[in-house]
Image (cartoon, rainbow, N blue to C red):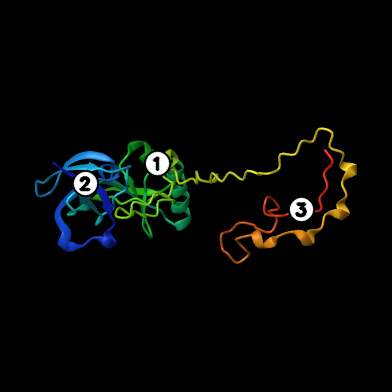
């Protein structure tokens, strides 16, 4: 059994590398590890690092470098329409609130055929009909499809929260530890009246120690970082 270990997006698929096709429904196109049989009979073990949404026309790369193209299988769906865009937009909000995968076109929404959701759709005053077609729902807002299987870049964003598919940004805390070093002042008996602030000569500050300036583009504020780089030569502390 041949292992498929990485993903190649549709735009990068080379026809001369294709040796097989896999026709999969939406569920099987969102797996990490699964034994599959290709349309031509080839036995394939899908063995990815994490569950990855595979679109129609994407491919998985076998260990020997050959490609297996993914085809979206036709499946039972509900096609939802409304008398006006506002009503359809409201329904889309309710569907999203239930974390339900949905494919959105200019005048219709498609979801997997589900009788519970069908009742909700009726309650919202929308029309629906059962159809059989490939299902290619929207990806999460933070899933941009930037798969780089050949480069091995680990950008540190693939934590457990990414897999939930809810579209919320779980990366608000970027893990920057802004520790203030060199400020271990012993304030016991520290007489603030004894500070000679006039003796604090800012002319002695060695601003050349900053490796960055306002134009470096790193996004940090380097203008107020008075730490080990600044020499407070005239600052007299009487501990």
Observer-nearest of 82 and 214: 214
Cα separation between marks 2 and 1: 20 Å
Viewer-nearest of discs 2 and 1: 2
**Residue, disc 3:** 232
Mark in the foreground, 1 or 3? 3
Q: Is residue 185 left or right of residue 125?
A: right
Residue 96 visible in rendering: yes
**Residue position for label 2:** 4
Task: Give the image location of residue 96, x and y in percent.
Answer: 44, 45
Query: x, y percentage for residue 59?
Result: 23, 54
Give the secondary structure at mark 3: loop
- Provide the residue designation for mark 1: 163
**Considering only order in the chain, which callout, 3 or 1, is on the residue closer to the N terminus?**
1
Label 3 crowding class (10 Å Cα cut-off): few <14, some 14-19, many 20+?
Answer: some
Residue at the (39%, 55%) spot, across then down: 144
**Numbered marks: total:** 3
Q: Say which element carries label 2.
A: strand
Residue 89 at x, y percent in the picture? 46, 53
Q: Quadrant of the C terminus?
A: top right
Q: Please indicate whether residue 216 sits to the left or right of residue 239 in the image.
A: left
Q: Pointer 1 and pointer 3: residues touching (CB < 8 Å)?
A: no
Residue 122 appears in view: no
Q: Residue furthest left?
A: 41
Q: Nearer the viewer, residue 4 or 168?
A: 4
Return the residue nearer the eye: 182 or 14: 182
């Amino acid at each position: 059994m041949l292992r498929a270990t990485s993903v190649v997006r549709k735009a990068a698929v080379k026809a001369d590398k294709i040796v097989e096709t896999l026709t999969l429904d939406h569920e099987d196109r969102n797996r990490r590890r699964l034994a599959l049989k290709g349309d031509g009979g080839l036995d394939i073990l899908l063995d990815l690092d994490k569950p990855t949404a595979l679109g129609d026309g994407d491919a998985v790369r076998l260990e020997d470098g050959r490609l297996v193209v993914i085809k979206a299988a036709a499946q039972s769906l509900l096609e939802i329409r409304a008398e006006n865009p506002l009503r359809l937009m409201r329904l889309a909000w309710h569907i999203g609130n239930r974390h339900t995968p949905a494919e959105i076109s200019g005048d219709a929404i498609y979801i997997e055929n589900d009788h519970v959701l069908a009742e909700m759709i009726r309650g919202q005053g929308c029309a629906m009909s059962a159809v059989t077609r490939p299902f290619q729902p929207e990806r999460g807002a933070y899933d941009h499809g930037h798969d780089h299987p050949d480069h091995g870049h680990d950008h540190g964003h693939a934590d457990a929260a990414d897999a939930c598919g809810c579209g919320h940004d779980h990366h608000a805390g970027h893990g920057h530890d802004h520790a203030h070093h060199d400020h271990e002042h012993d304030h016991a008996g520290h007489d603030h009246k004894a500070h000679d602030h006039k003796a604090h000569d800012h002319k002695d500050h060695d601003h050349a120690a900053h490796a960055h300036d306002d134009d470096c583009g790193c996004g940090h504020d380097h203008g107020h970082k008075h730490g080990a780089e600044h020499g407070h030569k005239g600052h007299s502390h009487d501990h």
